[in-house]
Each structure stands twice: as C-alpha cells, then as structure tokens.
Amino acid sequence: MIFREAKTTDISAMQIVRHTVKENILSDPTLVTDKDCEEFITQRGKGWVCEVDGEVVGFSIVDLKEHNIWALFLRPEFEGRGIGKRLHRLMMNWYFNQTQELVWLGTAPNTRAEEFYTRQGWKKVGMVNKGEVKFEMSGADWRKHCLNIDQ
C-alpha cells in the first residue's frame, strides 16, 4: 500500500472509487465533477490517495475554506485493512497543522461511515443538509484522540 498526496491526474480514479461505495452514494454523478475535485485538492485544501498495485483504492479530501471533510471514500473490497483510518489520519494531521479551526462533516445516519467517525473521536452535534448527521472535531479533541490510539 502506498499513501500519497492526491494529484490532478488521480481525479478520474478517485471518481471511480467514489461511485463504487455501497453507502453514502451520490445518485447523480454530476453533483461532484472532475473540476470540483481539482478545485478542492489544488485550491481549497488537499487530498490523499491510497494505491494498491498501482491502483487508487481510496482517497480523502479536506476543505480549508469551509473547514469541512469533503471526502473519504474507499472501495468496498478494501475495507477492514486500516486504509480509511490512515487516510483519515493523514488528512486530519495536515488540517490541524494548517489551522486550529473546528472542522466538520456530514454523513448519512445509521451507516458504517457514522460508526467510523464516532470511533475516530468525532462528536455528533446535530443534523445538516438533507438529514445527514453533523460531526465536529477540534484540534484539542484530535490530539486527545491521537494520544489515546498511540498508547
């Protein structure tokens, strides 16, 4: 497994990953365009990918402008290998090295994603968008979570 920063040449592979997930599926692929992805990884924030045998199998993107986790997706056949945790950690460490602003995300309720974020130390703070669970994380909470998992 190779983890590295996402490049614009990864966008088509990232879009494939985004559309292979079983939960949190965007029913309309035009909702997130290649141009959107490029803006988020080159201007608004940063992204990371995980490659296995030269193929992108997961990615994450954080948005510094809106202080939001914009994406964390993994192909279903690669779940349970720690890839999501590693992508999450890379993204969160980078984010809190750039700013101490609170970061938030929204995800569908009663999903593996909701469970994942809860295990990663995120706090549920309400609802957002069209019925998604809203989570928040502070820099202090992130450092505390990292201390707990590193022991």
Image: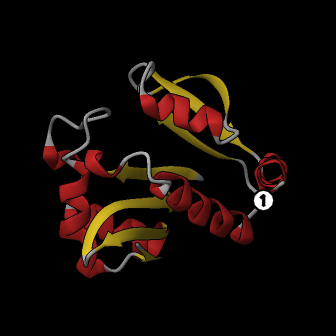
What residue does disc 1 label?
Answer: 100
Task: Please report the residue visible at 28 percent of the width from the left and 44 percent of the height from the top.
Answer: 76
Q: Residue at x 21, y 58 (%)?
A: 15
Looking at the image, residue 121 lies above or below residue 10: above
Answer above or below: position of 131 versus 138.
Answer: above
The residue that appears at 62% across and 32% down in the rendered structure is 118
Horizontal side of 71 relative to 126 (left or right) equals left
Relative to 86, 103 lies left or right: right
Relative side of 106 to 130, left or right: right
Q: Dot 1: what SS?
A: loop
Residue 92 percent location from the top left of the image: 63, 59
The chosen color scheme is: secondary structure
Q: Is residue 113 left or right of residue 137?
A: left
The spot of residue 68 in percent (x, y) is: 55, 50
* Horizontal and vertical percent position of residue 31: 21, 45
Indicate the amino acid at tag 1.
Gln
Task: Choose between 86 and 33: the one closer to the eye.
Answer: 86
- Give the residue at x 24% y 81%: 9
Question: Is residue 46 at least partly visible in the picture?
Answer: yes
Image quadrant holding the C terminus, namely bottom right
Q: Nearer the viewer, residue 84 or 130?
A: 84
What x and y, as percent, mark residue 5? 45, 78
In the image, residue 71 sits, relative to residue 65, either above or below, namely above
